[in-house]
Image (cartoon, helix red, strand yellow):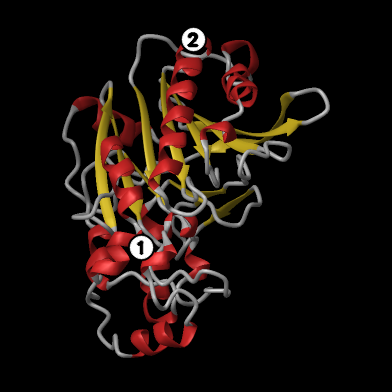
Amino acid sequence: MKILFLHLSDLHLSRPEDVAVQAVKGIAACLSPKSIGSVDRIIVLVTGDIAHSGKKMEYDSFFIFRRLLISELRATVLDNTLIYVYIVPGNHDIDYSYISNSDNRKYYEDFLKKQTKATSFNIDEAELKARQAFFQCSRIMHSLDARNSLFRRNVIDLDGFTIEINLLNTTFFSLLHENDQGLHFLPNRIIEQLASPSGAMMAITLLHHSHQWFNELCKRSFEQVLLEKNTIIFCGHEHFSSTQEIAYNEGSPVRIFGGGSLCNRGDWSTSEFFACIYDTDAKEFEQHRFQWDNYHYFYTDKLESRGYLAHKYSVDGPKQHNATHITSLLEDQHIHI
């Protein structure tokens, strides 16, 4: 089975007119079987900054984009199958008018100094209200909501191949204008939930800010769990397309996709996105980076690389004891049994 992971990031939509129909059609066109080969499943992963300033009307624009994208993918890439869409927030998915300390770095630094055990932190009402428009949008797609504001996990079964999809909210402690690198924070209980096994055959995580943006109070433990557990990590924020392969503590390497900006408030002239096609039988992948050619009005494909992805089986978790899973373990040349 071949799974298409379509990684989109940093849309910054503010009004319906920001959705460029031609560009959205172009996304589907360059993922057609004639372009990249046929696929069996599609999972769309959006890593934050969906809106420009966290307002409800901006998410109405995202729903227009989502409907159009799904319609074009079904017409051009793969018909008659469920297309999964998962989203996480970015710093532009915050309505900062609710937050009085939106540019006060010292306020957050002082707050973090008090988190000696870093087990949890209280999210006040203003912070939740600042993200309420995102949560209303997100919960419809089985992603984060006000009750699960920091972390949510979904496990999906694709014809016997199970994927654990972890959604992280990294936006708390974001500043409106100042550089907030080193402020981002997740409490221990969230890191422990991320580390907990699900028994899925592959784990992936979506987050807007990469682990390099996190506070020293949690960075080391968060980085270890993130890199040891996941097969693939998708992040955004940098507006720069990049891929990394990192092996942590001599474990199997994780593939990290850093997404570029799909749209800048209606300007698609520098639009770019990633597509990763993963073959669950061969455990091989190929990744494509697409960039919009503003002169010819289509996306150009840059085949980045091909390679092997190790199934990490959700870290020491209870395995799905079925014949297919056990056989795949025994036949995996990268796992010596």
Residue 286 visible from this viewpoint: no
Query: Residue 145 versus residue 202: which sits nearer the camera?
Result: 145
Q: Residue at 49% of width from left, 9% of height from top?
A: 75
Foreground residue among 99 and 152: 99
Q: Where residue 144 appears, x then y in whole percent?
A: 28, 49
Residue at coordinates 21% horizontally, 50% vertically from top-left?
317
Between marks 1 and 2, how big is the CA–CA gap?
Answer: 39 Å
Give the image location of residue 233, x and y in percent: 46, 49
Q: Residue tagged by mark 1?
A: 225
Q: Which image quarter holds the C terminus?
A: top left
State the image coordinates of residue 302 (x, y, percent, origin top left).
72, 32
Residue drawn at x 45%, y 43% as measured from the top left: 58
Is residue 116 visible to the viewer in this orientation of the structure?
Answer: yes
Which tag is nearer the camera, tag 1 or tag 2? Answer: 2
Residue at mark 2: 75
Task: Determine whether 192 is above or below 74 in the image.
Answer: below
Q: Secondary structure at mark 2?
A: helix
Q: Nearer the viewer, residue 69 or 282?
A: 69
**Crowd tier of the residue under label 1, counting other residues whose Cα lies within 10 Å: few below 14, some 14–19, many 20 or above:** some
State the image coordinates of residue 84 (x, y, percent, origin top left). 35, 29
